[in-house]
Image: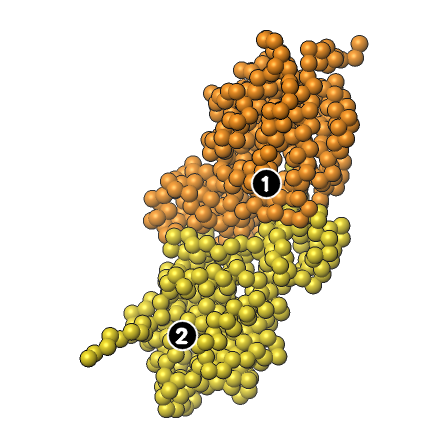
Amino acid sequence: MIDLLDHLKRMISTAGLSGFESPIREILMEAWAPFTDELQVSKIGSLHGLKKGQAESPRKRVLISAHMDAIGMMVTDIKDGLMHITEIGGLDHRILPGQLVMVHGRENLPGVIVQPPAHLLPKDLNDGPVDLKYLLVDVGLRPAEVAAKVRVGDTVSFAQPPMELTGEALAGHTLDNRVSLAATTLCLEILQNRVHDWDVWAVASVQEEETLGGALTSPFEIRPDLAIIIDVCFAKGPGANDWQTLPFGEGVGLGYGPNIHPALYGAFEDKAKALEIPYHRDLTPRMSGTDAMAVQIVAEGIPCAIVEIPLRYMHTPVETVSLKDVRRAGRLMAEFIADLDAETLDKMKWEE
Amino acid sequence: MMTKNKEITVPEIGQDQLELLEKLCNATAVSGDEGEVRQIVLEAIKPLVDEVKVDALGNVLATKRGHGENRVRVMLAAHMDEIGFMIVDDKDNLFQFERVGGIDERQLPGKAVLVGSEHLPGVIGAKPIHLTTTKERKSKVELSSMRIDLGPGIGDKVKPGDRATFATRFKLLGPSIRAKALDDRFGVATLIELLKYPPDNVDLLAAFTVQEEVGLRGARVAAYHIDPDMAIAIDSTPAYDLPHWEEDFGNDHYNTKLDAGPAIYVMDRATIADRRLVTLLEEAAQEKGIPYQLRQPGGGGTDAGAIHKVRSGIPSISVSVPGRYAHTAASIARVSDWENTLKLLHAALIKVTPDFLKGERRG
C-alpha cells in the first residue's frame, strides 16, 4: 500500500500553479505508473492515465477527473528588490500578509508576503484590510540580486510546510486539490487487485482554478461514458457552519445539483450505503465550482458524479483535511468502478 | 619561542553563532513564560561567567568580571520574551486565543502556530473566500472570530493558559535570516557572544530579561538588583525601508535601513539616551570602521526605558539590529547587520574608562 501521508506531503510540497503544472505532473506520473497501462500528457498539460478493463473490446470508459493545479500568485512588478504580485485563482487578500512563499525565478527563492507599515500605505485604509496591490514579497536578497534572478511573470507559490494535526488531520497549502489526486491514486491501487470491466481513465486536469481548461479538453479526447469528478468541499469549522458545509472527518460528500446526473448520484449513494462509507449530500443549487461544470458539457454531454472530500479553510495556506475522508473517497470510487458492467449505462436513465 | 596568538579577539558570526540563533528563534518564550529560552541561555553561559542566578521574575542575571583596576560596572540587557498568544477558551476542540504583546490582527488569518510546551502544531484558519461576501472582505477578520485548530483528536492536550507562537522555522535566505522572534533573540545571542569576549576594563553584568513586550518589567527589577554604572539595551528595531505605495513619494520614515549597520538610539518614546553613550558608540564605530546608523528618533522603546529610571538613575542607551517585519510570523534581517552590531558593542565596551561617566550628564 502507498503511504497516504507521505504521498500527500510530497504533493503539497511540489509546485504546480494553474498553467504551470509540470512539477506536480511529474510526481503523479511516478505515482500512477505502477497502477496504469498507459500515461499520456494532453495538449494543454493534463495527465491521462489509462488502466485497461477486462471486458471485451470495445470497452466502456469511466473518467476520474481531479484537478492538479494550485492557487498562488505571479510577479507583476519589482521595486527596490521587492515584488508586487497578482493572484492566480481566488484569494482572500486578508490571508496574505506574513505568509511564507517561494518565488520561482531563475532559481527558487524562499520569501515572505509583506504588509507595509501604515505610513507607506494609503491613508484611507484605516487599519482595515490591505489590498493585494499594496502587498510586497521580500526574498531577503539585495535589489541587484533580485533583478538578476526574478522577472515579471514569475510564479509565486505558498510555502507553508505541511503540519500533522491530531486525529489524522493534515494542514497545509494546496490540499485543494492534491487530496483528490491522492484519493485517485488509492483508487487505482485498489483496482490493481480487482476485476473491472471498464477502462478507467484517471485524469489530473490543469487550470481548474482559472479557466477549467483541463476539464473541457481531456473528456473530449477520452470520450468517457461516465465521469467521476473528485474535488474538495467546505467542511464545517470556525466561521463556516451553514448548509454549504459538511462535517469534518465524518465522511465524503456527494455533490447534488444541476452539474450531476441524478441516476449516477443515486448509484453512488447506494454504493456508499452498501459499503457503510459515511457520506453527506452536498447541495449545489446552481453550480458545483468543480471540473464537473466543464466535463458535463463536453461534446454531446457526459453524465457526471462528484465525490468530495471536506476541507477546512479552503484557499488558505492552512487548509485542513481528514485522512480518513481521503481513504473513504478512494475506496468508494474504486468499489463503484469495479461494479461497472454491461448493464450499468442502461440504469442511468432519466425518469420515464 | 614565540607562541602564536591563539585567540580571536574580535567576535564574529560563524556557523556556531547562527546555530545558536536558530535554536533561540525556534524556541517558544511568550512574555511571562520564558522558560525555554532561559534554559538555552543558562546552558550557554554557565561555563562563561563568574556568577549566574535566576531572579524572582525569571530574569537570568550573570556576572563576568574583568581584571583591571577601577572597573566600570556595565549592564547589558536583552529580552528573552517574544510576542505570541495565550489560549483563553476551549469549545468543540477549537481554541480561542488572546494576543500577548503588540500584534496586528491582520497578520493572523491563515497562519500556522505551535501551542504549549510540546509545540503542538495548529492553525489559525480563515473562512473560505467562496463563502465570504464582497462587503465582508472589506473589513478585517476580527480576533474574536479566530480559533486555533489542532485537529479533532486534540482532547485535553491543550488548555486555557497555554501559550502559542507562530510556527515559522529559522531559515537563511542568501545574506538574510527569515525567522520569528528575531526581536529579541538577536539581542540574546549577541549578549551570549559578548560574554565570550569579556574586556578587562569592565564587569559585564548580563541581564537576559523577561516581559519586555508587555511592559519592560524584567529589566526594571534586573537593573535594581545589578545597580550598574551604565546600561546598554541590545534589541532589534524595525527597518521600514520599503517603497511608498505612491510612485512619487519617498519614504522619509524608515526608522532604520537594512545593510546600514547597527542602529544607535538617540531617543525613542521611552528613553532619551545619555549623550556620552551615543558618543562612545559612534567613536567606537568610527575607529574600527564599523558601519552604523542613528535610528530615526521617535516611537518605540526598549528595556532602556525601564533601566534608566531605576534607583537614582542609570546612564542608558540602546543598540539594535535592524530587522524588517517584527511582530509578524516572519521577520527578515541581514547577518552582516547582526555581526556589525556585535562588533560595535565589543569595540565600545573596550573603550569604556573609569572616568568617562564622571561629572554631569550634558547634552
Q: Chain of mark 1?
A: A
Three-letter amino acid code at the position of disc 1: Leu
Q: Say which residue label 1 marks.
A: A5
Residue most extreme to the front: A193
Q: Residue at x 42, y 71 (%)?
A: B193
Badge 2: few (under 14), some or many (20 or more) residues near its Cα, within 10 Å? some
* Closer to the camera in the image, B300 or B198: B198
State which quadrant residue A173 falls in: top right
Residue A322, given in percent of the width and then of the height, sits at 67, 40
Residue B351, position as x, y percentages in the image: 34, 81
User: A145 or A50, which is in the foreground?
Assistant: A50
Residue drawn at the location 73% of the way across and 56% of the way down: B156
Query: What color is chain B drawn in?
Result: yellow
Q: Report helix, strand or loop for mark 1.
A: helix
Residue type, mark 2 in image:
Lys
- Chain letter, orange in picture: A
Residue B337 in the figure: left or right of residue A337: left
- Name the residue furthest right: A352
Mark closer to the observer (2, 1):
1
Residue at 78% x, 27% y: name it. Answer: A273
Where does the image place residue B43, in percent across and percent down from the top left? 50, 71
Q: Is residue A279 left or right of residue A109?
A: right
| Residue position for label 2 | B196
